[in-house]
């Protein structure tokens, strides 16, 4: 492994320590050996565009480290973030399988490693390895569920504070592990700007700033750079259920 951007570049999928924990990566050895020959590994800085909405599907990106946002833009220029992709996900899959333009723009939120596989090689890979087909179905199901959850959250939440509370609670399911932290706080790493959070919940940046300030004044949230601390999870949960 080569070190860059303070993380290890995973060059060999067979030796990846996260292999068993990730949906698409947990493949039989013979499939991974083939994958090694058709993938191109790259490290992308924050703000890199992997896919552009409306462009022909040239291939898929398997996210190894880092994260990326999937967003769509209206004709009027309004942008909505559909979801945040995590390591192990295959991006551009729907477009490649359907031979349709990419349905969303994919932009990295932090330094990110991704393996690119061309559409031709990926389709052939599926034909040769039936195990991969099941993983593709599982990934597409995951994408569908994420879209359903997002639409449900936006449609049924009655207020912006409730939407932001839901977002924070979702992030709290994957807390940071810090050497020193208060036992009653949940640390989370937030890579989104306030503008991006606004795009996620369908509001303005000013509204997001006001809601976060209210959460901090009430002692529910503490922010220290990119690390946020949920100080009163029950209060956020009560806001969501009321």
Image (cartoon, rainbow, N blue to C red):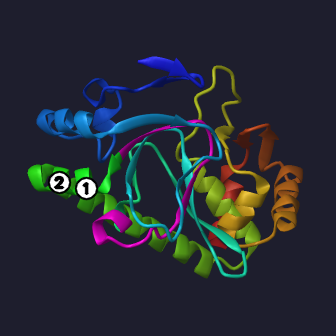
Q: Which residues are magenta?
A: 95-116
Q: Image check: 216 left or right of 133? A: right
Q: Which residue is mark 1?
A: 120
State left or right for residue 112 relative to residue 219.
left
What residue is shown at x 31% (from left), y 39% (from top)?
39
On-image quarter of the N terminus:
top left
Residue 38 to residue 214: above or below: above
> Does the segment drawn in magenta span residue 105?
yes
Position of 179 with respect to 212 (left or right) is left
Residue 37, image x, y percentages: 23, 35
Residue 135 location (% of width, % of height): 23, 54
At horizontal 29% and vertical 47% (from top left) the residue drawn is 24
C-beta proximity under 8 Å, tags 2 and 1: yes
The numbered dot on residue 158 is none
Looking at the picture, tell me which residue is in the foreground, 83 or 117: 117
Residue 217 seen: yes
What's the mark number on residue 124? 2
- How many numbered badges does the structure rendering display? 2
Does the magenta segment cover residue 218? no
Q: Secondary structure at mark 1?
A: helix
Location of residue 71 by image quarter: bottom right
């Amino acid at each position: 492994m080569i070190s860059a951007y303070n993380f290890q570049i995973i060059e060999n999928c067979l030796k990846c320590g996260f292999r068993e924990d990730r949906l698409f990566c947990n493949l039989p050895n013979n499939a991974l050996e083939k994958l090694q020959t058709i993938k191109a590994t790259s490290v992308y800085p924050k703000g890199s565009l992997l896919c552009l909405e409306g462009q022909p599907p040239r291939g898929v990106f398997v996210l190894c480290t880092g994260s990326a946002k999937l967003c769509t833009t209206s004709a009027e220029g309004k942008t909505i973030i559909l979801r945040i992709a995590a390591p192990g996900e295959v991006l551009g899959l729907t477009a490649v399988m359907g031979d349709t333009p990419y349905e969303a723009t994919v932009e990295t939120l932090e330094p990110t490693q991704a393996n690119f596989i061309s559409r031709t090689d990926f389709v052939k890979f599926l034909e040769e390895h039936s195990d991969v087909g099941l993983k593709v179905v599982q990934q597409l199901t995951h994408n569908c569920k994420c879209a359903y959850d997002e639409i449900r959250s936006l449609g049924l939440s009655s207020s912006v504070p409730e939407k932001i509370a839901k977002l924070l609670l979702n992030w709290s399911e994957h807390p940071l592990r810090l050497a020193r932290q208060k036992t009653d706080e949940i640390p989370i790493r937030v890579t989104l700007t306030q503008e991006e959070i606004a795009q996620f919940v369908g509001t303005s940046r000013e509204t997001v700033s006001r809601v976060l300030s209210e959460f901090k004044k009430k002692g529910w949230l503490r922010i220290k750079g990119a690390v946020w601390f949920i100080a009163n999870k029950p209060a956020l949960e009560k806001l969501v259920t009321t």
